[in-house]
Amino acid sequence: MNRIAEAYVKLVLAVGQHDADYVDAYYGPPEWKAEAEAKKRPLPEIRGEAETLIADLSAHPAAPGDEEIVRLRHQYLLRQLQSMVSRIDLVSRQKMAFDEESKALYDAVAPTHDIAYFQRALDKLEKAVPGDGPLADRVEAFRQRFVIPRDRLDAVFKAAIDECRRRTLQHVELPPGESFVVEYVTNKSWSGYNWYKGGYHSVIQVNTDLPIFIDRAIDLACHEGYPGHHVYNTLLEKNLVRDRGWIEFSAYPLFSPQSLIAEGTANFGIEVAFPGEERTAFERERLYPLAGLDPAGAPRYTEVLGLLQELGYAGNEAARRYLNGEISRQEAAAWLTRYALMAPDRAAQRVRFIDQYRSYVINYNLGQDLVRQYVEKRGGTSDRPEQRWKEFTALISSPRLPSGLR
């Protein structure tokens, strides 16, 4: 498989010359990257070679007696290559329905929910945030009381990152020298991003286009850092690239099944690091004072956020309908305001994200749900925190596919 793995990495880099968002991270041999940049290969040629590698892998399956992780490696390479072919087809302007695209790229299809599903959550929020005017306006006005002032942002984020790292290191052994830096940026379609550079180092960017609510400090510190993307990429580099010599993990193609695992574990990692009431307690005692916010409001804010999470799949529905051509761009934003209770500026930013990343949106909520189910099925329930950390760490150290989570 090492020969196929090397060819796979070079194909990932070749696709990246046509698709600017495709290569999320690369820390393999620099000459491979230079070669890809020096000679831009035609997409049909790249697709043909990927198909050849798929046929080769299919003709030589892993042996039943192989170590499980070796069998997972074979499945991973095969499915990543199949996803690459589908991404090339999309870049080549082949049309796919939303669910067809997500299955082809991410090895998963998100459930479909009707309006009645979201209305039940909206009815709860009507009671939780009473008053006059549209519910979206009332919720936004309520949340504005919990915005981190711009001049306190860095202090709040550093405190959140330090706590997420402290909690993670109690359960996960990371290689010496791992590190990351935080940058504050603007004019992005996303709220936060981890750029893994290799050598156990990440650059984490926080988008400050819109006001940042207090809950986003822990969200982003865990999701992008500990035990999320930074830890995920660090463990893959340590355990698979360096210890086993599996070069395929030195390249991370964004539009691939790997992303559902990455985003799902990054989101679920928040619950793993802060079980039960521990998150609200830390925010109230540490982050609220740093942000200059009244800690007395923390419990109610947490309650409202919990209800808002029940609307999480509304973003998927907006993307599904929009990308399937059932609603316009403006209607997608209106849907997000109506059923996800996003303020108009945040809804517009989310549509920008959908325009750029398309069905990628399923990786956050569906990914989190699948990861939670997988970990809990293996005994990692909330009342067994040590087992939860054990199963979570094993997952982010392996090449398991989304279909393998069920």
Image (tube, rainbow, N blue to C red):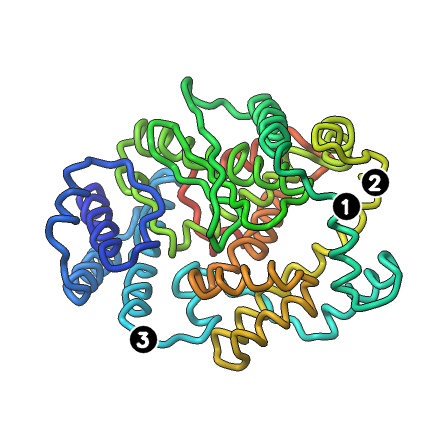
Disc 3 is placed on an element classified as loop
Percent across and percent down for residue 247 are 26, 38
| Element at label 2 | helix
Q: Which residue is mark 3?
A: 94
Q: Residue at x 69, y 68 (%)?
A: 339
Residue at left offset 81%, top offset 48%: 303
Mark 2: amino acid: Gly
The alpha-carbon separation of the residues under discs 3 and 2 comes to 50 Å
Who is closer to the viewer here, 116 or 304? Answer: 304
Q: Earlier in the sequence, mark 3 or mark 2?
A: 3
- 364 or 235, which lies in front? 364
Q: Residue at x 47, y 74 (%)?
A: 323
Residues under numbered marks 2 and 1 in contact, where contact means CB atoms less than 8 Å apart: yes
Of callouts 3 and 1, the N-terminal one? 3
Question: The residue under label 3 is which amino acid type?
Answer: Gln
Residue 262 image point, x, y percent: 47, 45
Left or right placement of residue 269 versus residue 397 in this view: right
Name the spot of residue 384 as percent of width and height, x first.
70, 33
The label nearer to you, 3 versus 1, is: 1
Residue 387 visible from this viewpoint: no
Please give the residue where the numbered disc 1 appears in the rendered image: 145
Local crowd at mark 2 within 10 Å, few (<14), some, or many (≥20)?
few
Mark 2 or 1: in front is: 1
- The type of residue carrying mark 1 is Arg
- State the mark number for residue 297: 2
How many angstroms separate mark 2 from mark 1 (CA)? 9 Å
What residue occupies the far front of the structure in this picture?
Answer: 151
